[in-house]
Amino acid sequence: MIGSRVTVKIDRPMGSYHPKHKDIYYPINYGYIEGIMAPDGEEQDAYVLGVDGPVQQFTGIVVAIIHRFDDVEEKWVVAPEDMMLTREEIEKQVHFQEQYFKSEIRM
């Protein structure tokens, strides 16, 4: 999947809060990829990095996969095609949610 072009439908735009956990604030856009099913039976979740404001949809490249050891889900990291991100930059931007899981970033 890394290197694939995907379109993410944003259901938690930058600046919003988690619908169930009101203390989780989204400093980045977060959504799902229609038609790709994840192990939890829902469509594949994705973080969108490299976008400066809230969007409804974003097409970009999968630059990393966050593998969670203590959850059935993986989260994809999607960024603009010409953007290079380090593992440390990704960790910093997704920490707001990934801090609750034991995970690793695969690039």
Image: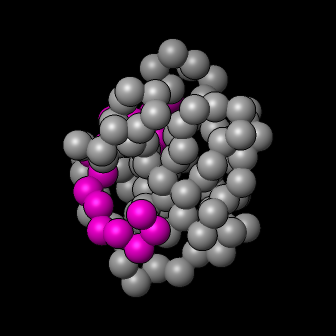
Q: Which residues are magenta?
A: 1-17
For the point 58% across and 75% down, the residue is 85
Looking at the image, residue 16 sits to the left or right of residue 58; the answer is right
Q: Is residue 83 above or below residue 72?
A: below
Task: Name the outermost residue toward the top.
Answer: 20
- Marks counted in the figure total 0
Looking at the image, residue 40 sits to the left or right of residue 72; the answer is left
Judge whether residue 96 can be spotted in this image.
no
Judge whether residue 97 can be spotted in this image.
yes
Looking at the image, residue 54 sits to the left or right of residue 24; the answer is left
Return the residue nearer the eye: 52 or 61.
61
Task: Name the outermost residue toward the bottom.
Answer: 82
Q: Which image quadrant is residue 89 in?
A: bottom right
Can you give x and y, in whole percent of width and height, for residue 35 in the image? 23, 43
- The color scheme shown is one colour
Q: Is residue 70 above or below residue 87?
A: above
For the point 44% across and 48% down, the residue is 46
Can you give x and y, in whole percent of width and height, for residue 54 in the image? 35, 49
Return the residue nearer the eye: 41 or 45.
41
Is 14 magenta? The answer is yes
Can you give x and y, in whole percent of width and height, for residue 1 in the image? 42, 63
Can you give x and y, in whole percent of width and height, for residue 107 in the image? 60, 70
Q: Which image quadrant is residue 98 in?
A: top right
Return the residue nearer the eye: 62 or 17.
62
For the point 57% across and 32% down, the residue is 72
Task: Name the outermost residue toward the front.
Answer: 39
